[in-house]
Structures are given as structure tokens and as C-alpha cells.
Amino acid sequence: MALSKQQIAQRIAQELKDGWYVNLGIGIPTLVANYIPEGVNVTLQSENGLLGMGPFPTEDKVDADLINAGKQTVTMLPGSVLFNSSESFAMIRGGHMDLTVLGAMEIDQNGDIANWKIPGKMVKGMGGAMDLVAGTENIIVAMTHANKHGKSKLLKQCSLPLTGRACIRRVVTDLAYLTIENGAFVLRELAPGVSVKEVESLTDGDLVVADDVCEMTF
Amino acid sequence: MALSKQQIAQRIAQELKDGWYVNLGIGIPTLVANYIPEGVNVTLQSENGLLGMGPFPTEDKVDADLINAGKQTVTMLPGSVLFNSSESFAMIRGGHMDLTVLGAMEIDQNGDIANWKIPGKMVKGMGGAMDLVAGTENIIVAMTHANKHGKSKLLKQCSLPLTGRACIRRVVTDLAYLTIENGAFVLRELAPGVSVKEVESLTDGDLVVADDVCEMTF
Amino acid sequence: MSKKLYANAREALAGIEDNMTLMLGGFGLCGIPENCIRELVRLNIKGLICISNNAGVDDFGIGLMLQQRQVVKMISSYVGENAEFERQMLSGELEVELLPQGTLAEKCRAGGAGIPSFFTATGYGTEVAEGKETREIDGRMYVLEPGLTADFAYVKAWKGDKYGNLIFKGTARNFNPVMAMAGKITIAEVEELVEPGELDPNFIHTPGIFVQRIFEGVDYEKRIEQRTITQ
Amino acid sequence: MSKKLYANAREALAGIEDNMTLMLGGFGLCGIPENCIRELVRLNIKGLICISNNAGVDDFGIGLMLQQRQVVKMISSYVGENAEFERQMLSGELEVELLPQGTLAEKCRAGGAGIPSFFTATGYGTEVAEGKETREIDGRMYVLEPGLTADFAYVKAWKGDKYGNLIFKGTARNFNPVMAMAGKITIAEVEELVEPGELDPNFIHTPGIFVQRIFEGVDYEKRIEQRTITQ
């Protein structure tokens, strides 16, 4: 059975390592914060200028001057740091983040990603996404395997305007955990109850099934 | 009679305007701070990271963590600001300083300046001088008209390695106040008791005597 | 230096003219110069190029200026949450230049720091790089981005003194300090004007040299876009 | 993240090897990483390229490393006040690359911020521009300067916590924050180690993300080069 959004986030959370600095995009990536494993301390960055993001505030602690990159009210934790936008992206562009998790409309077997623009539709902008994919070595894409019309989002080549080129190495979808290696998607883990065939049928790009492909554990 | 170092500084101080941000180099320029006119408030920048430099400390206020660009112990004033080296030179390079006063070994009628290196001698380095002459629109050079061998320091073309090109517009020497315009030195003011002839004889570069040349007043 | 101090937005905004380029601090509605925007709306200056990470919402922030069609071009990284903006953009009344958020921030800083252009990997291989110089450096491709300056930069700080020294609060800092650097004339509105010396010199975010005018703002609304609560 | 915390310089400097490139914070002797330098001298690592605004004095700071001929190249803006330095430089034992102070600072920041190179007017038409790309932009000539990084950056802060968050004091800040950004491994020595949360998040100079190791230093000498007094 396909994973829920929560389960996608839960699977990604398993990749977190103690001490990492992590930027979580809007949508499924945000949910990753709810599944950080016991004993693993990660510091969440919000690119509008906060390192060490805490949970949403209680009613009495809401502060209009303290929001995250999704414009949601948040809190700080002991050890948090505030900074300006150029300092924030110095961290990102300079390769100091250990992991970026973000959503995508399309990715392809060359590691390209498209997640900001659909021609003919209202464009809201790329925000910090282009900086994050260009600046972070370690990126995990969180998305559904197919779009709402049932078409694959794992392509030979992205059709939408790109956010970044040759930057994606890992993706967790509702069906599987895949890596991108040597110009192909490599199927590493299957969601419980999902078959290799199902993944193959919904993957438009070249797919290699790893010898040790296995079922995800939670 | 030729001006003393103090008098050169005093003449330069007359050019200061209320509200200006000023960087004073080592040597004669430093003395300018002693002659700031009544009612004129200027903020002194020290490029190692201080805006709003105060006087030298009394014995009990000496702080090893508070020095100026000449590595002298200094103090702060109400409204002072501390910052790092890249922020400091963002101010300078970005053209935010109103005036730089610095010494020179040579200047020429094209506005070039040389003040950091004598070939064959030990080179200490340019420090912040190249940044200051490139970044400040308004520069006053403070120096003696001739070197200790009696040779002019106001040249047709600098012979020493340059600090900056086409950046100097004004110079106050022990003999005169001159501007640099259209490829020539323009004699504007004479030190008390100094003749046009004396300035001419010690100026190697092309010299134009301004119609309204006058004696300096203090 | 006391000449930096102005009584209010009306006095501080003197000199603004049609067709100027403005920078406006803020991220979403957080840390925006509310008083300056209110005055820009009142003055109804037209033909403005606005550099701001976002474009406000329909009835607040830069959205108020869009309603009056004061803006001909926005340079931003994200412009959602604004129906009037969308209408003007799709109809071609409003030109929009979208830039990656970090590139936008760095372009402002560069403009303020006297750096005419810099290379960044961000946006290489995307629409953002179209028409721009690209170059391989140590095996990686980069895009050359020019610095940005503005005729006026409007920033909002928490506290400030008459020398123009500023401190910001929380994530309301965002683009304000880099835009303060990049304004030919930078106007700072502060929630609280304090005496020189009250701000610790070791902890000032924007040194006064970058600020030409300052005033104490009034009636801050500080609207929240996404009020998210832990029960 | 607790793994950032080390007991002393000896433990924190693990991994340093001959022929590495190092950055060392400080301006003159103000804000230099005294404990790290002492340990580098004890280890007697050789063949080092040192990026530091100055080179210490004969018997303190980087001067101690020069005495042992540990340094093959200095990248600095000003290297006076050091007779042994002068001797090695004139004899050709020591290579020296002199850069304008602001260019040096910006090159460190650029290296840390992922900017491979930037244009600056500083040094155009001088020896500093020799062999470098130059370009006219809007009627003015500029020099292209690459960013700098280092295998290790050693910085000295006033206070810090186990996450690596740092604050500096007075003008001892200088190059330390930009070098902290540019080190592949940045080691911070602090006068006082404090608990997380003790440093106000709004007033931290160097966010911990830039610092990989931190320790509380001992026996700070804080030598003064020019003790100038008002009677």
C-alpha cells in the first residue's frame, strides 16, 4: 500500500544523523520534524533567518516577529540563532547544511529537479529552493511517485522549468526509496505491500532494481 | 614657513563637515582628530572594526580587545559600533565613508597614489590603504611636499608601485593646499610665508596656480 | 548627525519621486516598513520598481501599493498570496523578475558593499541564468549576478538611535540589514527610538553609517500570515 | 552536537597535518587564537600556508611558528613588526602574498558563502591585479578575486556554547567571523564556555553551524602592541 505523507516523512527521518543541520521545505518535508529518531539531535534551519527552530508556539507565545520560511509562527530553542538573509544563504550556498528535504513536481534520472513553475499557470516564485538545491550536497526529495493524473514524476528528463541541475541523489515517494546513480533511478526499498512491478510501471525514467532491494521498515 | 605636521592636520580638519564618517590613516592623518572644529561632529572609523572611535584610554580603561587600525589602545563613545572585517570594508568599498585622509610617498597629476611599497626595501603590506583609496570618493592626502632628500612627491607620474589609480583629488602638504584637476596640480592655498615660486620649484608635476590662490588661515 | 532624525514617515520620505527604484525590507509581512509603505500609498507615487522578497498580501504591505498601481516592476523571490498581484502580472501591467532568495539577498549586500558582480552556482541551468554570463570554475558551473542598489531603501528595525544604529528582533531582521546597505538613501523606521549608548556597541545589527534617515514609527499592525499554534 | 566540545587545544587540533592551509583570526595580536597557535608550535607541523591579516611579532602569535620555520607561505595584508619574518622573506624561505585588507576579508567571506569569485575595484591598476582578470563595469575597472577556504580555520571568541555559537568582544572580532565561515573544519577557542541559551539568540556573531569544534582556552596573554594612554 502506498505510504501516507506522514509515512514518507517518517522514512526520511530515519536518514537523519545526530548533529546535522537540516532545512525542511514546505509540505511533506515539514512533517519530517515530527519523526526525528530518539537520541538524534538535529538543528532545523529556516532560511528567513533562524537556526534552531522549535515547535509552533502556544497561544500566549505567538510572536509576529518570529516566523519560519512558510510564514508560520514558530518558537526558538536554547542555542537558537537569528541572522539576516544574506547570512542565512551564506550557510546554504556555502555548503554548510548537512541535509535539505524538499518537495518536487518532477525529478529525472540526471538528478535534475523541477518544483517551482508550471508554464501558463500563475508563478509564485522559487523562494529559496534554487539556493537550497545548488548549495546542499545532500538532498532528499519527498513527493508522490505519480501526479494526480497518475503520471510519473520520476522522468527521463524533466519537462517543467528546472529548479536545479544534476543535484538530486535520493528520493522517497509513497511507493519507494530510490537513489539516482549513473543516469538511472535505483530502487532501494519498497513501501510495505508495494511490488517492484508497480514501481516500474509508475517510473518513467530508467529504473535499476538494486540486488538487495527490500521492504521499508519503520 | 613650512607647516608643521600639526598644522597640516589642522588645515585638513577645516574640511570636515558635520555628520561625516571619516577614516584617518596612520601618521599625520591621525592628528586631524585633534583639530575637529567646534560644532562639527564626525564619526571616526577604524577599519579593524570600530565606528565611533574615542580618545586613547586612561590607564585604568586600557583594554587589549579594543584597538584601532594602528594597533593602539582606544576607547568607544556613546553610539559606537563594532563589526567584523568584511562588514568594515563593505562600508569602505561600498562608498559609505565621507572622507579618507591618508599619507603618501608619491602622488601624481593623474590622481595616482603610491604609499605602500619601495622596491628593494622590506615591504610591510598595504593593509587597508588600497581599499580606502578605491572605495572613498573624497580623499585628502596629507604629506610633506618633498621627501627627506628634497625631491618632490607631487609628480608627473608616480615612480613607486601604486596603491590606487586616478583616485586622489586633494592634497595638503607642508607648503600648500592643492587640488588635482584635468591632469594637473592646482595650487589653491599657500602656507603662511611660502611663495608660489617655492611650491613651483618643489612640484615636479604640472602646476597651475589658481586665480584666487590665497594664504591658508587657521 | 542629529540631522538623521525625522519626526515621522511624512517628513522622512521627502525626495521620493515617480519612477524610482526602491528596496523594502521584510519577509512576508514580517519586518516590513509599515509606516513607509503607508506613506508611499498616501503619496501615490507611480512607476516604481520595487525590490522586496515578497509583494505583501492583497490588503497589506506592498499589496496596498499594487492596488493603486504604483508599481511597474517587482524584483522578488516569492510573490504568492496576492490576487491583485496575479491579475496585474498576468495582464502584463506589472513586470516581475523572480530571483532565488539567496541570490536576491546577496545581490543587495553586494550592491551595498561595492561589489559590482559575483558568481554563484544558484540558478545555473535554469531560467534564472538565461541571458547571464556563466562560467566553469574548478569543475562547476556558475552564473554571474550583478549587485543591486536602490534610490531609497526602506527598512524596519526594533530599536534605533539618532545615529542610525539599528537592532532587529527575531526573524523580522531578514532582508532589512542588506537593504540598508544598498540604499543610496536608507530610511529606517523603528519601533523604539533610544538614546545613543543604549544599544550595546557589540550587538548592533546595522551600523548607523548605512542609515541616512530614521524615525520612530507608529501604529504597527504586525499582521501574521500563518498563525500556527501548539495546543 | 555535543561532539563539538573538546577539552583543550591538544584534543581539538587532531587531524592537522604538514602542508595544510590554515586561516588564523585576529588583527595584530588582538583576537588571535593563542591556544591554537601554542599547540601548532608544540606539534611543530611544517609546510603550512597561513592566511592571516598579520604575522604576529617575533616572540608571539604567528611569529612563534615562523621561528620554527613551520610556515612556507603567508597570505596577509600587513606583515610589519617581525624581524624573523623579514629575514625569511628576503632570503626566499618564506613566500608572501600581500592582499588589500578588505579584499582579504571579502575573499574569506566569499569562500565561506559559496561564492567562487567576485569583482572589486580595490587594487585595480596595482601589482595586486597582476595576473588577475579585470573588467570594465559601468565605466569603472574591476579585478576578479577568487574566494578562499582553508583546511582548518582557527578563531578566538569571547564566549561560546557547545553548539559552536560565538560572540566576540570589542575589536577582537575582526577577521574571526569570516574565517569561521571559510574553514572546512573551524576550531573555535573561547575565553568562556557558556550553557546553550545563555547567549541571546538575537546577538550571536557566529552561528554554530560554522564551527565544528570548540574548547575553552586557558592562559590568555592578550599582548598589547601599542599601549597608548590619555593622562
Image: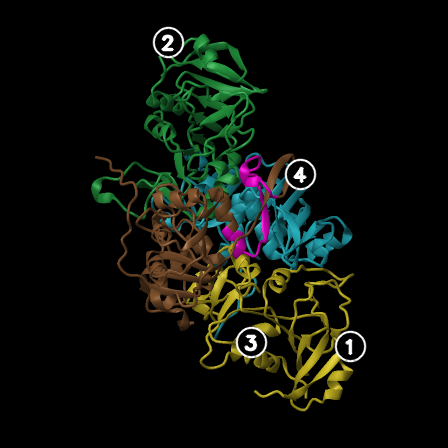
Chain colours: A yellow, B green, C cyan, D brown
Disc 2, SS: loop
Residue carrying label 2: B193
Residue type, mark 1 in image: Asp
Percent across and percent down for residue B152 are 46, 19
Q: Which chain is home to disc 4?
A: C
Q: From mark 1 to mark 4, how far is it between C-alphas?
A: 49 Å
Q: CA distance from mark 2 to mark 4?
A: 55 Å
Disc assigned to residue C19: 4
Residue extending farthest bottom? A193
Q: CA distance from mark 3 to mark 4?
A: 46 Å
Q: Secondary structure at mark 4?
A: loop
- Using residue D106 as the reference point, say whether residue D11 is left or right of it: left
Q: Position of residue D129 (x, y in %)?
A: 57, 40
Q: Relative to residue D106, is residue A59 depicted above or below?
A: below
Q: Which residues are magenta?
A: D108-132
Front one among A24 and A74: A24
Q: Residues under labels 2 and 3: Cα distance?
A: 82 Å
Query: Is circle 2 on the same chain as circle 3?
Result: no
Q: Which residue is mark 3?
A: A32
Quarter of the rendering occupied by the C terminus of chain D? top left
Q: Nearer the viewer, residue A75 or A106?
A: A106
* Residue type highlighted by circle 4: Asn
Locate residue A134: give its quadrant. bottom right
Q: Share a chain, discs 2 and 1?
A: no
Q: Position of residue C124 (x, y in %)?
A: 68, 57
Q: Is residue C7 left or right of residue C140?
A: left
- Position of D231 relative to B149 (above/below): below
Determine contact: label 2, label 4, CB under 8 Å. no
Task: Report crowding for label 4: few under 14, some 14 to 19, many 20 or more residues within 10 A (C-alpha).
Answer: some
Mark count: 4
Cβ atoms at labels 2 and 1 below 8 Å apart: no
**Residue C223 visible, this angle:** no
